[in-house]
Image (cartoon, rainbow, N blue to C red):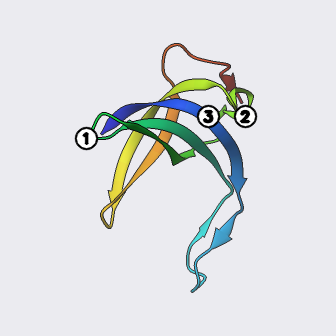
């Protein structure tokens, strides 16, 4: 499933490369995004929510840190948890930098 997630891009960071405890799987460094979004509650009130989003290395999101952005995201689920993966900027594209 694909969705657009909109909010303030609060933080962009790189997670270190690693491997599984048994040493059978390895993974490279990964770009991660933290996005502050507004969630409307049943009573009409709203609260801010920080969402962690994985991203590939094709686009550098760092120039948009602190800006309001809209991201195309693919959703996947594992063990009842939904994981978003950023696939690029939605319109209007803000400060997209192709690597």
Between 38 and 67, the one lying in front of the other is: 38
- Residue 48's x, y, as percent? 49, 41
Alpha carbon of mark 2 to alpha carbon of mark 1: how far?
34 Å
Neighbor class of circle 3 (other Cα within 10 Å; few <14, some 14-19, many 20+) is: many
The residue to which callout 2 is attached is 62
Neighbor class of circle 2 (other Cα within 10 Å; few <14, some 14-19, many 20+) is: some
Q: Earlier in the sequence, mark 2 or mark 1?
A: 1
- Residue 37's x, y, as percent? 49, 36
The residue to which callout 3 is attached is 9
In the image: residue 64, left or right of residue 77: right
- Residue 86's x, y, as percent? 51, 38
The residue to which callout 1 is attached is 42
Residue that appears at 56% across and 79% down: 24
- Residue 50's x, y, as percent? 53, 46
Identity of the residue furthest to the left in this view: 42
Q: Considering the numbered disc 2 on the image, is that residue within a helix, a strand or a loop? A: helix
In the image: residue 57, left or right of residue 80: right
Q: Quadrant of residue 27?
A: bottom right
């Amino acid at each position: 499933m694909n969705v657009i997630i909109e909010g303030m891009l609060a933080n962009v960071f790189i997670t270190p490369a690693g491997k599984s405890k048994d040493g059978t799987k390895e993974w490279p460094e990964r770009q991660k995004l933290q996005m502050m979004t507004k969630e409307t509650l049943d009573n009409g009130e709203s609260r801010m929510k920080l969402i962690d989003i994985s991203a590939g290395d094709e686009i550098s999101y760092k120039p948009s840190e602190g800006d309001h952005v809209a991201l195309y995201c693919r959703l996947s689920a594992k063990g009842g948890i939904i994981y978003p993966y950023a696939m690029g900027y939605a319109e209007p594209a803000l400060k997209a930098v192709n690597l």
